[in-house]
Image (cartoon, rainbow, N blue to C red):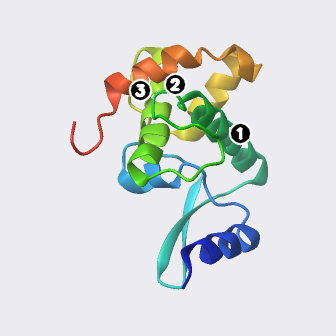
Amino acid sequence: MDESAYRQTLEATHPLLCPFGKALFSGCVACTQAGRMNLAERELIVCRATDLQVRCANMHDALRHNFGFAIHMLHDDAPIPHGQEMRIQCGGLRGLQDVLRDDAEVTDVDELMRAVMQRWPEEGSIPFSAVVHAAHLHYKGRHG
Protein backbone atom coordinates (compact mmCIF):
# COMPACT_ATOMS: atom_id res chain seq x y z
CA MET A 1 0.00 0.00 0.00
CA ASP A 2 1.20 3.49 -0.85
CA GLU A 3 2.24 5.09 2.47
CA SER A 4 0.97 8.57 1.59
CA ALA A 5 -2.42 7.18 0.55
CA TYR A 6 -2.56 5.22 3.81
CA ARG A 7 -1.78 8.37 5.84
CA GLN A 8 -4.44 10.41 4.00
CA THR A 9 -7.07 7.71 4.50
CA LEU A 10 -6.07 7.31 8.13
CA GLU A 11 -6.33 11.02 8.88
CA ALA A 12 -9.69 11.26 7.10
CA THR A 13 -11.23 8.27 8.88
CA HIS A 14 -9.61 8.71 12.32
CA PRO A 15 -9.52 12.44 13.14
CA LEU A 16 -8.54 11.83 16.78
CA LEU A 17 -5.07 10.49 16.05
CA CYS A 18 -2.66 11.72 18.69
CA PRO A 19 -0.13 14.18 17.24
CA PHE A 20 2.37 12.95 19.87
CA GLY A 21 1.80 9.28 19.06
CA LYS A 22 5.44 8.56 18.23
CA ALA A 23 6.54 9.94 21.59
CA LEU A 24 3.92 7.84 23.37
CA PHE A 25 4.91 4.68 21.49
CA SER A 26 8.57 5.26 22.33
CA GLY A 27 7.78 5.65 26.03
CA CYS A 28 9.57 9.00 26.39
CA VAL A 29 6.25 10.53 27.58
CA ALA A 30 2.88 9.28 28.84
CA CYS A 31 -0.67 10.62 28.62
CA THR A 32 -3.82 9.77 30.55
CA GLN A 33 -6.00 10.73 27.57
CA ALA A 34 -4.32 8.37 25.09
CA GLY A 35 -5.95 5.20 23.89
CA ARG A 36 -4.78 2.49 21.53
CA MET A 37 -6.55 0.96 18.56
CA ASN A 38 -5.62 -1.27 15.67
CA LEU A 39 -6.14 -0.55 12.00
CA ALA A 40 -5.11 -3.21 9.53
CA GLU A 41 -1.83 -4.47 10.98
CA ARG A 42 -0.88 -1.23 12.71
CA GLU A 43 -1.42 0.03 16.21
CA LEU A 44 -2.49 3.67 16.60
CA ILE A 45 -2.60 6.13 19.47
CA VAL A 46 -5.86 8.09 19.59
CA CYS A 47 -7.09 10.85 21.87
CA ARG A 48 -10.17 10.40 24.01
CA ALA A 49 -11.59 13.87 23.23
CA THR A 50 -11.73 16.14 20.18
CA ASP A 51 -10.93 19.35 22.07
CA LEU A 52 -7.85 17.78 23.65
CA GLN A 53 -6.64 16.43 20.31
CA VAL A 54 -7.03 19.85 18.70
CA ARG A 55 -5.11 21.49 21.55
CA CYS A 56 -2.24 18.99 21.20
CA ALA A 57 -2.27 19.26 17.40
CA ASN A 58 -1.86 23.04 17.71
CA MET A 59 1.02 22.58 20.15
CA HIS A 60 2.66 20.02 17.86
CA ASP A 61 2.41 22.49 14.96
CA ALA A 62 3.93 25.24 17.12
CA LEU A 63 6.77 22.96 18.23
CA ARG A 64 7.41 21.86 14.65
CA HIS A 65 7.54 25.46 13.49
CA ASN A 66 9.84 26.54 16.32
CA PHE A 67 12.15 23.55 15.89
CA GLY A 68 12.59 24.39 12.19
CA PHE A 69 15.97 26.01 12.59
CA ALA A 70 17.28 23.35 15.00
CA ILE A 71 16.39 20.48 12.65
CA HIS A 72 17.28 22.34 9.43
CA MET A 73 13.70 22.32 8.14
CA LEU A 74 12.87 25.06 5.66
CA HIS A 75 9.08 24.61 5.43
CA ASP A 76 6.56 23.70 8.14
CA ASP A 77 4.65 21.37 5.82
CA ALA A 78 7.68 19.48 4.47
CA PRO A 79 7.89 15.79 5.39
CA ILE A 80 10.61 15.08 7.93
CA PRO A 81 12.45 11.91 8.92
CA HIS A 82 11.36 9.88 11.93
CA GLY A 83 14.37 10.93 14.02
CA GLN A 84 13.62 14.61 13.53
CA GLU A 85 9.97 14.03 14.41
CA MET A 86 11.10 12.33 17.61
CA ARG A 87 13.21 15.40 18.45
CA ILE A 88 10.12 17.55 18.01
CA GLN A 89 7.81 15.26 19.99
CA CYS A 90 9.98 13.84 22.79
CA GLY A 91 12.37 16.76 22.94
CA GLY A 92 9.66 19.37 22.58
CA LEU A 93 7.46 17.94 25.32
CA ARG A 94 10.42 17.40 27.64
CA GLY A 95 11.62 20.91 26.87
CA LEU A 96 8.21 22.37 27.69
CA GLN A 97 8.13 20.43 30.95
CA ASP A 98 11.64 21.58 31.86
CA VAL A 99 10.92 25.25 31.13
CA LEU A 100 7.63 25.03 33.03
CA ARG A 101 8.73 23.00 36.06
CA ASP A 102 12.50 22.54 35.89
CA ASP A 103 11.92 18.78 35.46
CA ALA A 104 12.01 17.07 32.06
CA GLU A 105 9.98 13.95 32.91
CA VAL A 106 6.56 14.06 31.22
CA THR A 107 4.19 11.69 33.02
CA ASP A 108 1.01 13.16 31.51
CA VAL A 109 0.93 15.16 28.27
CA ASP A 110 -2.64 16.28 29.00
CA GLU A 111 -1.64 17.73 32.36
CA LEU A 112 1.41 19.38 30.78
CA MET A 113 -0.74 21.02 28.08
CA ARG A 114 -3.16 22.33 30.72
CA ALA A 115 -0.29 23.77 32.77
CA VAL A 116 1.31 25.36 29.69
CA MET A 117 -2.00 26.94 28.67
CA GLN A 118 -2.52 28.26 32.19
CA ARG A 119 0.97 29.78 32.44
CA TRP A 120 1.09 31.09 28.85
CA PRO A 121 -2.51 31.65 27.67
CA GLU A 122 -1.31 33.04 24.34
CA GLU A 123 0.71 30.62 22.21
CA GLY A 124 3.00 33.47 21.20
CA SER A 125 4.04 33.97 24.82
CA ILE A 126 5.55 30.48 25.20
CA PRO A 127 9.35 30.87 25.35
CA PHE A 128 10.03 28.49 22.47
CA SER A 129 13.73 29.36 22.23
CA ALA A 130 14.14 28.12 25.82
CA VAL A 131 12.02 25.06 25.01
CA VAL A 132 14.20 24.17 22.01
CA HIS A 133 17.34 24.64 24.11
CA ALA A 134 15.93 22.45 26.91
CA ALA A 135 14.87 19.85 24.35
CA HIS A 136 18.45 19.63 23.13
CA LEU A 137 19.58 18.98 26.71
CA HIS A 138 16.92 16.38 27.52
CA TYR A 139 16.53 14.38 24.30
CA LYS A 140 19.44 12.93 22.42
CA GLY A 141 17.74 10.22 20.36
CA ARG A 142 19.24 6.80 19.80
CA HIS A 143 22.75 7.99 19.10
CA GLY A 144 23.10 10.55 21.86
Residue farthest to the left, as pictured: 143
Q: Which mark is residue 19?
A: none
Residue beneath disc 2? 96
Quarter holding residue 138:
top left
- What x and y, as percent, mark residue 6? 61, 76
Residue 97 visible? The answer is: no
Relative to residue 44, is residue 24 depicted above or below? above
Mark 3: which secondary structure?
helix
Give whichever of discs 3 and 2 has the lower sequence position.
2
Numbered disc 2: secondary structure: helix
Residue 108 placed where, x, y %? Answer: 51, 39
Q: Nearer the viewer, residue 30 or 44?
A: 44
User: Considering the numbered disc 1 on the image, is that residue within a helix, a strand or a loop?
Assistant: helix
Mark 1, residue position: 58
Left or right for 79, reference 54? left
**Residue 113, percent from left and from top:** 63, 32
Residue at image point 70% right, 69% down: 14
Classify residue 142 as left or right of residue 33.
left
Alpha-carbon span between mark 3 and mark 1:
18 Å
